[in-house]
């Protein structure tokens, strides 16, 4: 059953479904790419490039999102591990705790708990973790959004153009490989991870389009029954988070307390 809600200029589509268990076996991997050494016994645990925009990892097909350099690739599952609200019912994207201006919204979200639990159960401490590369997750804090025009945690609204350029645009808040300060983890993709760079155009001309790889990823999710899925970025309004919709080639917003698919991503090293 689909519910359609319009909040200002924000189109919100909530998808209510039962939890679809991820058919994943245990995972694990990671290390600076140029220093990774593997044995014959390790080989079966490393991702295999299928040369069609996917890799096989943990006996599953993952969609390649982008090349991260030095043999590292960002990949996302083509299956949901859960269907969950982003935040507790009637709460906005950011919590209202006393230190919430330092919170990036994703850190204390319900969806991050789903992602972290999945990683602990399926990857942490297993041979698969040897292929996982440490990452640092960029995401705007409440203070960042307030500088863009939000008034409070419950009264936030910026233009779609401002949101696209400064929150989900190319280079705005991407996931980055960071061996010194990052950690091996699963995560939700950000809008910036999927954004199509506009070569030859100023950054403020970004129109919200996603890359060809992101469209292929979206289509693979749809083929597995996932119509909508969360991203970790905030949306234009304080009540919503960003997400992917199977029939749209741009990132859109979903009311934060609606139940939407949770899909893990990783950065892994290809041998």
Image (cartoon, rainbow, N blue to C red):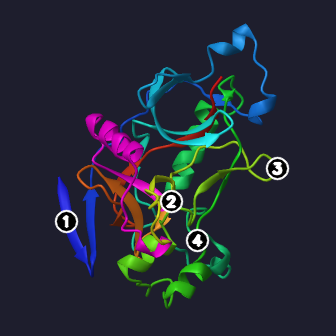
Could you classify mark 3 by the number of other residues whose Cα lies within 10 Å: few (under 14), some (14-19), or many (20 or more)? few
Residue at 33% from the left image edge and 36% from the top image edge? 220
* Residue count near mark 2 (Cα–Cα under 10 Å), binned few <14, some 14–19, many ≥20: many
The image quarter containing residue 212 is: top left
Q: Which of the marked residues, 1 or 2, is nearer the chain's N terminus?
A: 1
Which dot, 1 or 3, sits closer to the camera? Answer: 3
Residue at the image position 42 percent from the left and 71 percent from the top: 164
**Residue 112 on the magenta segment:** no
Q: For the residues carrying marks 4 and 2, which lies nearer the camera in this image? A: 2
Q: If you read the primary sequence from the N terminus, does the residue marked by circle 4 or circle 2 appear first? A: 4
Residue at which label 4 appears: 140
Q: Picture coordinates of residue 6 (x, y %)?
A: 22, 74
Give the position of the C terminus as an image quadrant. top right
Quarter location, residue 10: bottom left
Mark 2 to mark 3: distance in Å? Answer: 22 Å
Label 4 element class? loop
Disc 4: CA contacts within 10 A as few (<14), some (14-19) or many (>=20): many
Q: Which residue is mark 3?
A: 180
Q: Which residue is mark 2?
A: 192
Residue that mark 1 sits on: 4
Residue at point 45%, 44% (across, down): 263
Residue 62 in the image: above or below residue 262: above
C-alpha separation, residue under disc 1 versus residue under disc 4: 27 Å
- Which is closer to the viewer, label 1 or label 4? 4
**Of 170 and 168, the residue lying toward us:** 170
The residues colored magenta run 203-232
């Amino acid at each position: 059953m689909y519910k359609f809600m319009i909040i200002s200029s924000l189109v919100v589509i909530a998808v209510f479904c039962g939890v679809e268990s991820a058919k994943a076996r245990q995972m694990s991997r990671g290390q600076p790419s140029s220093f990774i050494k593997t044995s014959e016994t390790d080989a079966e645990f490393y991702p295999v490039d299928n040369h069609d925009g996917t890799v096989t990892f943990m006996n599953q097909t993952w969609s390649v999102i982008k090349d991260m350099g030095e043999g590292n690739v960002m990949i996302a599952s083509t299956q949901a591990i859960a269907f969950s609200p982003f935040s507790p019912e009637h709460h906005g994207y950011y919590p209202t705790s006393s230190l919430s201006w330092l919170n990036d919204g994703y850190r204390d979200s319900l969806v991050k708990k789903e992602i972290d639990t999945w990683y602990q159960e399926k990857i942490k401490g297993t041979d698969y973790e040897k292929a996982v590369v440490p990452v640092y997750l960029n995401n705007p804090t409440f203070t960042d959004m307030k500088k863009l025009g939000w008034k409070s945690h419950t009264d936030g609204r910026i233009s779609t153009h401002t949101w696209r350029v400064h929150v989900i645009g190319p280079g705005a808040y991407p996931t980055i490989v960071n061996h010194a300060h990052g950690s091996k983890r699963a995560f939700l993709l950000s809008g910036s991870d999927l954004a199509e760079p506009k070569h030859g155009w100023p950054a403020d001309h970004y129109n919200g389009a996603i890359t060809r790889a992101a469209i292929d990823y979206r289509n693979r999710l749809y083929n597995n029954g996932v119509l909508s899925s969360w991203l970790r970025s905030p949306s234009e309004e304080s009540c919503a988070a960003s997400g992917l919709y199977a029939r749209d080639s741009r990132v859109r917003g979903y009311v934060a307390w609606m139940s939407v698919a949770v899909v893990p991503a990783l950065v892994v090293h290809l041998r």
